[in-house]
Each structure stands twice: as structure tokens, then as C-alpha cells.
Amino acid sequence: MTGTDRFFRVLCWVVALCVVVFMLFPLVITVLVSFSASQVYTLPPPEWSLRWYQALGRRTGLLDALLLSLNLALISTVISLVLGTAAAIGVARGQFRGRAALATFAVSPLMMPGLVLGVAMLQFFREIGLRDAYWSLLLAHIVITLPFIMRTLLAAMGSFDFSLVDAARTLGMSYPRAVAKVLIPNLAPAYLTGGLFAFLASMDNYPISIFLTDVFNRTLPIRMLQYMEESPDPSIAAISTGLIMLAVIALAVAARTVGLNRLITG
Amino acid sequence: MRLSRQSDRIGLLVLPGLAYLGLIYALPLFLLLLKSFRDATGDLSVVEFVQIFNDPLQRSIMARTLRVAFLVTVLALVIAWPTAIVMRRAKGKWLTLFLVAMILPMSLGVVVKAFAWSILFRTNGFINQSLMALGLTDAPVRLLFTETALVIGAANVFLPFMVLPIYAVLQQQDPNLPDAAATLGAGPYQRFFKVVLPLALPGVVAGCAFVFSMAVSMYVIPSLIIGERQQTVAMQIARSFLFLRNEQLGSSLSTILLLIAVSVVLASSWLASRLGARQ
């Protein structure tokens, strides 16, 4: 190893450690600010307190927004898992042309500007006369969640041995039963990873949802941005801290069951 | 015979998902494209686009959007590369730390992260306090509402989408390749430019395309960090639909953004497949 090598190796480590700080620092600051007694964001805080957590109770519509977001994320993820399982089996086992193009199409919403999708859906729903905000949001959130599921399931089924399903069928199982009893348990890590990221993407979505909401149906990110514009006090940091804790728990569970490395490679 | 008929029928399983995406995703986008290429009387025209490109304000907004997206991509790439290299070599607790630093922020909403940066960039915020404590500046520097702050904040939000694809391709490389090249007499620079970098290029291309297309259309981050005075195309689109009720302008700007995003994705997948074929 030459001196140049050693220099670059050290440089890489320095940059990488700075990146870790860069990535985690905003989250740490958010948590600290949420426990501060001060109205302004001075750090370190003059005194610690839970007043911003108590203030959450006075935020109108916060609970409704949280429940709506959970509702949308859960239902759209479940529907996407059903649609995605069927479609991924069709791509993996079907004998038709254009399967690669179809797979690209199914994953392509990930690459589209969210705002543009939101605008397009707003105009489309209006044209077909769909005025209900909840249903518009749900239809849109399935488009948000489905590509995440398709991406992991397509990768997982590409290397799955489908003769296991055929074997189960020879033993007298119906096709749907064989899928439920053999395929899904075998691909459990892919289902967990895809489902988790789909759920989070739906929970977090702002740019599509903003065009489809009405006064009674505000999702959590929309409410939070609205609070920030109206009265940006540290109670928003308290909500954020709650979301950070949720993400930490979800990741800890995922790390235990499938491992962090598998989580990103699918 | 029976088997092939069965797999024909299995192919039909794609239909529900395909029909859903066709109806709720592709058709609305197609109608949006169609609408933006029509004038008030409904005839095909590009008048709206000509007007946009002739308007100095719109041109400067577009230039800012592209400039910011480009800088975000460059910044993300410059810090993602060493990180991915280190992650590939790291093991055990170190690897866990790096993975958590990527995945935890990625699984949080952009609203949470943009809010955190808007706190950090305040005049009395942490960054200014540290700068003054270190004696680097006497008076607080204006950070919020600057393009620099926007680029830093956005690079932070999109960084995992640059690091992870590069990390993925580096993992597939034989870790002994650079050493093998060294044995054959290749110097450090030669090893980097002739061995490590070319093999990692598909990941770099994928990461850059992903980050650029997200940065060009980001909305929440600029609206919290840079505010209304220095608009981006995405903010213009939201405003023209939500406040100005100028849907024709919004549709045309959406089409421009859509074309940019689609061409970046197509160009990158073409480039990635060419790079893949060469190896």
C-alpha cells in the first residue's frame, strides 16, 4: 500500500463519518428541540420541559390527520400487496411478450415527479366526477405504494424456485392456496421490506395528497406543513420526534427479522 | 401442452394491477400532456410553452430549478462516493452505523427533515451559533432563504438514493480487484480510473438520475427552506393550481417537469445498459 492509498483511505473514512453526522444531526436536533422549554429554538435549551408535548393536545385536527394517514397507508399497502403479488407472479411465470417493459412500467411511478402526478390525478378525478376526497386519496395512494411492492416482489420472484408451488399443487392444493402457503412464507423478507417502505411512502406523501385533500381530509404531512406556516413553535418538533421514534421501532423490528443489509438490497 | 396453457393463464394475473396503473396513473398523465398542448379553443398548439419560454421570470425560475438540481446531484455524488467505498469495507457495528445513518432518515417523511433544516438554518439557529462560537463570523449569516441552504438541505434528504445504488454495485465487485491491478503495476490513480470507477459506473448513473429527477421536482424542501420569493418550477405548479387558479400555466409547467424527469430516466437507463453491455 502506497502513501497515496493510505491518504485516500483516511480521507474516505473522514468523509463517511462526517456523512453519518450530517445525516443523523438534523434528527437529533429535532428531538432536543422538542424537549426544550423555550419558544425559540436555542440550543442547548435553557430548560428542559414537556410543554410542547402537552401543547399537542391543543392542536386541532392532529389526531384526525394521524388516523387518516394511518388508514390510507394501511389500506393502500394491503391492496397493493394483493395486486402486486398477482402481477409479479404474472411477470415471473407468464409467457407473453413485453414482460420487461411491463415491469418497468409498474415501477415507473417511483421516478415521476409527485407534484405532476398529483396535478394529473386532480384533473382526471374531476373529469370523471369523483369529488370525494377520501376515495381520491385512497386511489392515489395505491399508485404510491404499488411500485415499492412491485420493485421488491419482482426482484424476489426472479430468484424464487416456482417448482415449489407446482409441487404443492401436485399435492392437491389450489393455486391461490399454494401461493399463500408456499410462495408468500418463502418470500416473507421481501413482503416485509416492500410493505414497510410502501407504508412509509404513503404516510409521508405530500406532493400528491395536497391536490386531493379537502377541509375534512387532511393527511398528517399536510397538517404539519400547515402548522409550520401558521405557528411554527416546537410542538412540530414534538410531532416529528414521535415519527422518528416510530421509524426507529420499525427499523429495529426489520433489522431483527430481515437484517438491515437485506432491507436495502431487497 | 397443458403446462404452456397454464402459464398462458398465469400471465393474465398481471391484468388487475396493469389495468389499475393504466387507469389511475398512465391515463391521467396522458390527459395532462394532451391538455397542455391545446390552446383555449381546444386546438393543438404550443402557444403556452412559447409564452413560458419568452417570459424572463419563468426562464429565471427554470434556470434556478435546474441549477439547484444539478448542484444537489454533484454535492450528493461527491460525498456519497467515499461513503459507499467505506461502507463496502466496513463490518459489524460500523456497517450497522452507516446503514442506520442511511435508512433511518430515508424512512422519515420529507416534512420532518425539511423542518429540521429550517431550524438549523435560522439566524439564531445552531449553525450560526457554532460559527460565532468558533469566531468564524461576528454577526449571524443569513442562511435560511438562500440557495446554498436549499442545496445542502436537499442533498441531505436525497443522499441515501445516491449512496445505496453505488454501495450495491461496489458490493458485487470482487474486493481483490484493485489489489490485483496493483500487483500488475497499476498506480493508485490508474486503479481508480481504470478498475474501480468503470465497474461502479452503473450505480453512479442510477444514483445521479434518481437524485436529479427528485431534486428537479422537489416541493416541500424549497417551500420550507427558501420560501416564496425565490420560486422553483414545482412551487409554481402548486401555486398555479392551489392559489392562482391558473390551471393552463400549471399544466404546461407540469408537462415540462414531466418531460425532464422522463428524459433523465430514459437517458440513464440507456446509459446503464450500454455500460452493462460493455463489461
Image (cartoon, coloured by chain):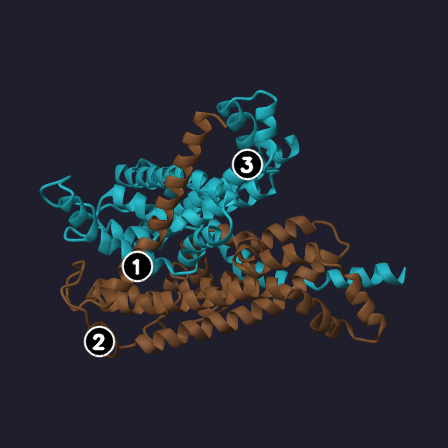
Residue B198 seen by the camera: yes
The label shown at residue A28 is 1
Identify by letter the chain in brown.
A
* A190 relative to B39, above or below: below
Asked if labels 3 and 1 share a chain, the reply is: no
Q: Name the residue: 33% across, 61% down.
A: B112
Horizontal side, residue B13 vs residue B137: left or right: right
Q: Which hue belongs to chain B?
A: cyan
Which residue type carries mark 3?
Ala
Comparing B148 with A248, the one in front is A248
How far apart are labels 3 and 1 at the CA level?
Answer: 33 Å
Rendered location of residue B157, percent (x, y):
37, 51
Q: Quadrant of residue B105?
A: bottom left
Which residue type carries mark 1?
Val
The label shown at residue A55 is 2
Identify the residue under disc 3: B200
